[in-house]
Image: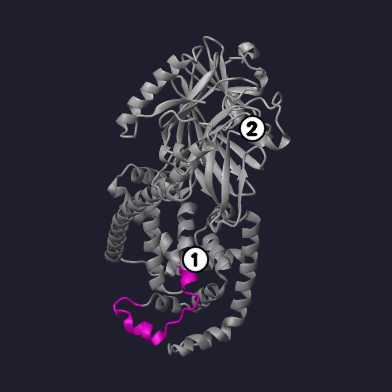
Amino acid sequence: MTCALRRQIQELGESVPIYSQEGRDQLWRNVATELSHRQSAGLRQRGTRRRAMWLLSVVACAVLFVIGLPLFNHGYLLRTQMLEAAARSDRGIVFSSAAGANHTGSDYSWVAGNAEYDLWLHVDGMRFLIRHKASGQTWSTSPDVRDARVPASQLGRLSSPFSIRYGDAMGRVEGWANPYDDATLIEYYHISSGIGIRYLFEDLRIAVRIDYRLGDGFLEVRIPENGIETYGSYEVKAIELFPFFQVRDGAAGNRLILAGSGEEAVDAALHERLKSQVMFGVTGDQFGFLAEVVEGGEYASIHVDPSGLMVPAQRVYVEFLLEGDAAHAPKVHPTVRYHALVEDAGTGSVAELLQQHLRDARSRSRTAGAALVAG
Amino acid sequence: MKSDELKEKEIVVRCLRGDQDAYRALFDHFFDELYRTAYMLMKSPADADDAVQETFIRVFQSLHTYDLDRPFRPWLHRILLNVCKDYWKRRKWFFIPLEQAYNVRDQKTPLPEDSMLQDEELARLAQAIRELSPKHRAVVVLYFLNDMRISEVAEVVGAPEGTVKSRIHHAVRALRKRLERSDTAVYHLLSKRGEGIQA
């Protein structure tokens, strides 16, 4: 059956009328024409596709840029530079406890350095040390709480690099928060000659970014653009930076502020008048610093606290008001430089820095003519 | 390798080198075989024309993808079969009144079926083959008409050889049944066309 079927089917195939040469030529022309048409259409399509892909990639780049730039500015893209990474970047410099403070090297990570100074960060992300290489002298942004004789309620403020005053828009709720007392997520990112830290207050849903940069003889602390983010119902009304900078238990010294004409800085009534002042500091025989508010001075308020029962330390620090006019001010980036007074923390060094500051301030068209007030 | 296969490969290689004449040579070499196959697979001569043209276009477009180490015929027939499948999908329902078909056809070129109908037995066979399912029709045409080996048929239809054998077996059985009972059916079918076929 199969052979017969094969024969029959082949016969059937033979009986299929095949085109004449003329018909076949016609079919060939059809094929060639259609092929040519499709090839040119394909080329056009490829060109269109290529243009579409190019356009798409441009749009994608633009979208990435639009999305990525704020993320980058907010430090999201740099979060991988965590403290561990910072620790790995330690170039083998071991912090010496003999340098002048009671700190152990293992608690600190080297962050940045230049010819004269090194900047170190404590593993808890709260405290910095500036170390003068030649003398070994150090400046601490907050005292070592282990040795501080302060009430437990003050430990948070004492240990934190800053505190914020927050509240709701209606003014019904107001309070203080700092990274030590409140649940805070700390993230690190690299910046040139320093480190950036983002403190996210998880309960308040407030994030504060601060850039710490080591300059030529100073530590610059700056709240960058969009450095304060609020995700909840609270807003930041004020921030005080390094409220215990270089405070030492029992140490004597002079608190300096750039004030009007010789009034006592410790006078509480003077506080209101000090709001526009942009320079403050502490001097002593062997230690001292002079802080300069480089940006945001118009919203700065200098606080001078004498040693007391609650906080047995003489201190002077800056607070920036971020509510009222400041909330609507365009691009205020509070920036403070903490100049280290090396060895000679006396009047000479202070005067020199002050002169320099006044020259800079004059060039910035700020009001000068202030006097040095010793408290 | 057979001399035919060598010749086919040679033409393909010339095509791949950009020889324009080789394209026409390839067309001429395979036209009859493809046309017969398409004619048996499709249900109208016009569709067979279209299928063959489309097959050659696709072949020329994708010739660069052909693996020279493999036989060319199965590759070619596979493309034809894919083209036919596309047609089947597009035309699940196919019906042209015969009167219209006769009217549109040039009288000088007789309908191919006319010549087939001259042989009643072949006409019955053609009808029976067209009534097979597409899968069975494909293996029957490839295996019996084109005289392909089972392995080649398997390559064309993309199925294992065992499956192809099974399909051929079932297709032959179905054909036998149809041919046995088609004595009267074919008569009625053809007499409807008014051909006056003698039973």
The part of the image, by quadrant, that contains residue A26 is bottom left
- The kind of residue on which mark 2 rests is Leu
Q: Secondary structure at mark 2?
A: helix
Where is residue A80? Give x, y as percent: 56, 35
Quadrant in the picture for residue B161: bottom right
Q: Residue at x 59, y 77 (%)?
A: B179
Give the residues in magenta.
B87-110
The chain carrying label 1 is B
Q: Which residue is mark 2?
A: A158
The residue pinned by badge 1 equals B85
- Name the one closer to the observer, A57 or B21: A57
Q: Residues within 10 Å of mark 1 (few under 14, many from 20)?
A: some
Q: Nearer the viewer, residue B51 or A50?
A: A50
Rendered position, A127 above or below B66: above
Q: Amino acid at mark 1?
A: Lys
Q: Is residue A19 above or below residue A235?
A: below
Q: Magenta stretch containing residue B167, yes or no?
A: no
A171 sits left or right of B68 in the view = right
Q: Quadrant of the N terminus of chain A?
A: bottom right
- For image coordinates 38% across by 70% down, the residue present is A17
Q: Is residue B94 within the magenta segment?
A: yes
User: Do dots 1 and 2 share one subunit?
Assistant: no
Q: Camera-side residue: B54 or B36?
A: B54
Residue A1 visible at all:
yes
- The image shows residue A144 at horizontal and vertical percentages of 66, 25
- Give SS at disc 1: helix
Q: Is residue B199 visible?
A: no
Residue A350 vertical position relative to residue A82 in the rendered view, above or below: above
Could you tell me residue A72's position as x and y percent? Answer: 47, 40
Please give the name of the residue rendered at 66% of the width and 36% of the height, measured from the top-left corner.
A156
